[in-house]
Amino acid sequence: MLTPTDFFDQIEAALQSKRPFVLFSKPGQPSIKSYIQLDSESYTINDFSESGFVFAPFDHHKDRYYIPTNKSSFIEIETADFKISTPTNTSNTTNDSIHHIELVSKAIEEIKSSDLEKVVVSRAFQFTLKASNPIEIFKNLYQKYPMAFTYCWFHPETGFWFGASPERLLKLEGKSVSTMSLAGTQYYDASKEIIWDDKNRKEHAFVTDYLLDVLKDYLDGIKSVGSSTLRAGELLHLQTSITGRLKPSKEALKDLIHALHPTPAVCGTPKAMALDFINTNELYDREYYTGFFGELNISDSLTFRNSKKNIENRAYHTNRKFTDLAVNLRCMKLINSTAILYSGGGITKDSDPNQECIEIHNKIQTVKSIL
């Protein structure tokens, strides 16, 4: 079993040699894992039959990079306690709230005058950091958000990205599929009763109804449970869990991912109209924000490699493959000492531009609070 020192020494070695790697921890699992690529080549996803850790952009026409399992080392440490670094002072270099209010107002007008029902509009915030050690940033994310899918991704083609996502795109184990509808947001206040207004409930319903309709073509035995309230850091979201069994098809996983991404939770509905509005009006490239990331076609034997407890229980091991993908929300790109944080919100005809602006500022605190 690796010690935390040995584990992070290997990450540091990959950093120095500029080889692709990913550090990550899944919700509620007290361990940190890593895929470290053994060479410096760039590998891209073709048909989702590949095996490895994938990092995909919002725009599905652009390259989806991955770290192949057969060209990387997999290391893992169980429960690790780190002292959270004191956040450094940051200076905000972009704070154009007026532009975002205008964008939300334009979206509302478009919804009221067309067949567009919901559109997710976003913006990027830039901060200058006094300290920008990638490993320390990840440690802080891991410690502060144990119920999120936290990660630090590095690739020469994409640079550094970090995140603490509350939203699963899909999980596939054998033929069993689970996904979620996650939409609607409010700030967590322990002193107040949680009440969801009509705007947030309608926004959530758009996503849920879309997923249930689309998944009929790909899943059998679809079931949904919800909606319930999910806490993610200092924010609350409405969540509906959806499960089913993947229908037999040569490219079933590829077709399912293409159908799901991007969901109305990060794009809107109808999808084509929402994408057109985003591409015309956001005026910046989302890159990997609202894309997806995670493990693709991984043999579950890989998770037994470094765990004594699991080795002892190998009799229960099925040697099946699994896929576990999350939506890239609450994320950040790091370029030297500049941190670019991303945030957005779902707009419906009932949205209030000023409240939407407050919401996206609240959302960036997930990552900004650990810098």
Image: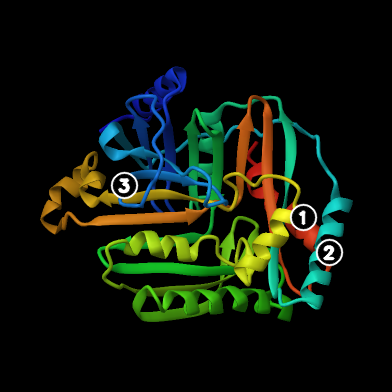
* Secondary structure beneath label 2: helix
152 or 247, which lies in front?
247
The answer to which of marks 1 and 2 sits earlier in the sequence is 2
Per the rendering, the mark at residue 281 is 1
Q: Residues within 10 Å of mark 1 (few under 14, many from 20)?
A: few
Q: Quadrant of residue 116?
A: bottom right
* Residue topped by disc 3: 50
The answer to which of marks 1 and 3 sits earlier in the sequence is 3
Residue type pointed to by label 1: Asn
The answer to which of marks 2 and 3 sits earlier in the sequence is 3
- Residue 261 horizontal side relative to residue 352, left or right: left
Residue type pointed to by label 2: Lys
- Which residue corresponds to the image point at 44% horizontal and 38% vertical from the top-left? 81
Q: Quadrant of residue 21?
A: top left
Q: Is residue 186 visible?
A: no
- Which residue corresponds to the image point at 13% horizontal and 51% vertical from the top-left? 314
Callout 1 touching callout 2 (CB < 8 Å): yes
Screen quadrant of the C terminus: top right
- Residue 310 horizontal side relative to residue 78, left or right: left
Residue type pointed to by label 3: Glu
Screen quadrant of the N terminus: top left
* Secondary structure beneath label 1: helix
- Which residue corresponds to the image point at 77% horizontal and 55% vertical from the top-left? 281
